[in-house]
Amino acid sequence: MITRDDLTAAVADGLLSEAQAAGLIARAESRAGVVDADDERFRFLNGFNDVFLALGITLIAAAFVSFIFFVGNGWVVVAATAIAAMWGLAEIVIRRYRAVLPAIFISLAISMFAALLLGEVFSSAAEGRNFIDHFSHLGIAAAFSLLAFVLVFYWRFRLPFTLGTIGGLGYTCAFVVVAYFAGAKTAAAWGQIITLCSGLVLFAAAVAYDFSDSRRLTRRSDCAFWLHIVAAPMITHGLLAPFATRLDMAAVLVILAGFAFFAVASLALDRRAPLVSILVYLGIAIGYVLAAVAMKSALTIGATLMVLGIIVVTMGLAWRPLRRMLLSPFARFAFVGKLPPLHPA
């Protein structure tokens, strides 16, 4: 039997157009009586063997980390060996087996070992520093070299998760550049602005991927997913962190307005990541309101979690009706055609 994954692979290989594959999927699901399939599909596991492989990769990476702790001055060779080993595993696991979860673990491990190695290569004061300290002492050359390395890794393996890593490294490079040219104090003072701008750039990239694959049949949809995962907390923190630290009723209203904005964006794009990222701030606002109405402090946390849970469950159950309510009035506008299609209730 031909599955959805088979059709997705056919689109990736150029055997079918996205519209043809979408039509076949819609017809098959309609004949099978599948009406409420999740719109935001994300292929994470091919089977339990992926978990097994991810466990083995984690153990190998942990072994290299333990070697780094105990070999003394030779740890640079260990780090280089770890990178070579992880790259070799990537050639098998990603290119041959296309296993997503193990590939994510490989991407994280190889990025970590590359950060260690490049931190040593470019550090001007490496002696006497343990390997963990290298993460906080990467210079501008090391940061951009690490970004270039991860870009090469993405070019080779086209792993969507790696785009999230690239986004995070790009954000780090922005801080490093500001600190290098304007000083650490200036970089700290501009932290919120740098965070917000970086998040907006990544969000724009994610939306571009979404618009290029509105029916979510290719790997571009997964690329958008990981970019949203990274961009959403940056935007949320960049916009709302100052209000959460100086909380009053005006700040609560700003946070609620932010929640409404993220809810609209999430529903329009059919992406839950932007909405999830603001739940912490929404919880802070709800807790402040509950405390202001003289609720006992012992009950505030539980009541806040209950309200948050009700909001999340309600939106999850009513996601499609809410999307239709939001987008139906704008159906005649061209931009709606680039969004994921609306589905019947």
Image (tube, rainbow, N blue to C red):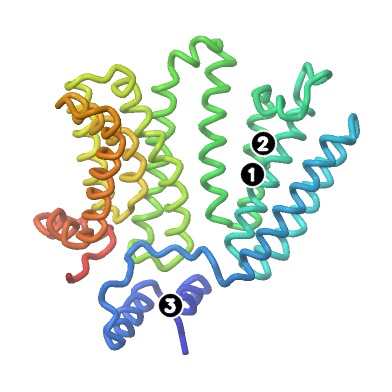
- Which badge, 3 or 1, comes first in the chain's sequence? 3
Q: What element carries label 3?
A: helix
Work out whether 235 lies above or below 40. above
Work out how far the residue at label 2 is from the one at label 1, CA to CA, in angstroms. Answer: 6 Å
Of 244 and 176, nearer the camera is: 244
Q: In which quarter of the image is the C terminus?
A: bottom left
Q: Name the residue under label 1.
A: 150
Left of 1 or right of it: where is 28? Answer: left
Amino acid type, mark 1:
Val
Disc 3 crowd, CA 10 A, few/some/many (<14, 14-19, 20+)? some
Q: Which residue is drawn at 74% across and 53% down?
A: 59
Left of 233 or right of it: where is 243? Answer: left
Q: Name the residue under label 3.
A: 4
Q: Which residue is drawn at 23% across and 27% down?
A: 288
Instruction: Determine which quarter of the picture holds residue 18.
Output: bottom left
Contact flag, marks 2 and 1 (Cβ < 8 Å): yes
Name the mark nearer the viewer: 3 or 1.
3
Instruction: Determine which quarter of the picture holds residue 65.
Output: top right
Q: Residue at x 16, y 56 (%)?
A: 327
Amino acid type, mark 2:
Leu
Q: What element carries label 2?
A: helix
Amino acid type, mark 3:
Arg
Work out how far the residue at label 3 is from the one at label 1, CA to CA, in angstroms. Answer: 30 Å
Q: Name the residue under label 2.
A: 146
- Which badge, 2 or 3, comes first in the chain's sequence? 3
Q: Is mark 1 on a helix, strand or loop?
A: helix
Total of numbered circles in the picture? 3
Disc 2 crowd, CA 10 A, few/some/many (<14, 14-19, 20+)? many
Disc 1 crowd, CA 10 A, few/some/many (<14, 14-19, 20+)? many
The residue furthest left is 329
Of 86 and 201, nearer the camera is: 86
